[in-house]
Image (cartoon, grey):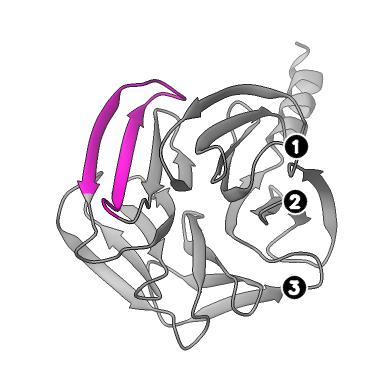
Amino acid sequence: MVKLNTAWTSSSKHFKQSGEFSATVKNSLDISGIDSSSDIDLDQTAIETFWCGTVDDKMYRNAGYFSSTITDSQAIGNPTGIDFNQIDTLITRDDGVTDKLVKQSGSFSATVKTSLDISAIETAPNGIADDGTDTIWSGNTGNKLYKTSGAFSATFKTSRDVGTVDTEPVGCDWTGEDTLWSGSENNKLYKTSGAFSATLKNSIAVGGIASPVGVSEGEDVLVIAILRRRIEGY
């Protein structure tokens, strides 16, 4: 069985914890000298870390999990959430005027493929993920997780109020089965069954380490690739 790790970010550091969720911090990277992080995503194919920063209003791509080498960056206004689906980069933007979900071609190009104004529903979007069919995202104003049909339509398929669990959801990711999200009220990482049920499958307090603002999950694909090369002889 492939071992999963949970990556999450505070405003000043990226963390990788063993499994879903253990108290073991496997790695961390201080990014306070670069920007104030607002979300994180792991690219399992290229072994890279995508994140966005709210001080310089940029998206970043770092080599590996986690190195201090920035392989690419792009300026974008008020990014609060990021996800890379192997083809495009999905972003949430919150500038207080036009709150949007944005899809940009590749990682990163200046080509905006589509966007959706969601300010009538949520004025503080702060996390986004692609489940292969629909767009999952989170917002602070309504204390909700949202699922929008496709990428992106104006059709809202479902939403889940998580205010009774944590009043500050600040990032989300899709594992293929469950929804991972972080909450800064209780300083916890959460795993909710499906998209979305009321069943909270797991949670872990990380307040002793940092206040979370985004979460992602990835496989140890680098180890798998090395083992495959040894077995197959290339």
Residue named by callout 2 = 16
**Tag nearer the camera, 2 or 3:** 3
- Rendered image quadrant of residue 185: bottom right
**Tag nearer the camera, 1 or 3:** 3
The part of the chain drawn in magenta is 97-116
Residue named by callout 3 = 207
Q: Is residue 94 left or right of residue 56?
A: left
Which is nearer the N-term, disc 2 or disc 3? 2
On the image, the x and y values in percent for residue 84 come to 47, 37
> Which label number is shown at residue 66?
1
Q: Secondary structure at mark 2?
A: strand
What is the C-alpha distance between the residues marked 2 and 3? 15 Å
Would you call the spot at circle 3 few (<14 residues within 10 Å), some (14-19), or many (20 or more)?
A: some
What is the C-alpha distance between the residues marked 1 and 3? 21 Å
What is the C-alpha distance between the residues marked 1 and 2? 8 Å
Which is nearer the N-term, disc 1 or disc 3? 1
For badge 1, the amino acid type reads Phe
Q: Is residue 134 above or below residue 47?
A: below
Q: Closest to the observer: 77 or 49?
A: 77
Q: Secondary structure at mark 1?
A: loop
Tell me what residue is drawn at x 77 percent, y 31 percent. Answer: 67
On the image, the x and y values in percent for residue 55 come to 57, 44
For badge 2, the amino acid type reads Lys
For badge 3, the amino acid type reads Gly
Q: Closest to the observer: 215 or 36?
A: 36
Q: Is residue 113 above or below residue 132?
A: above
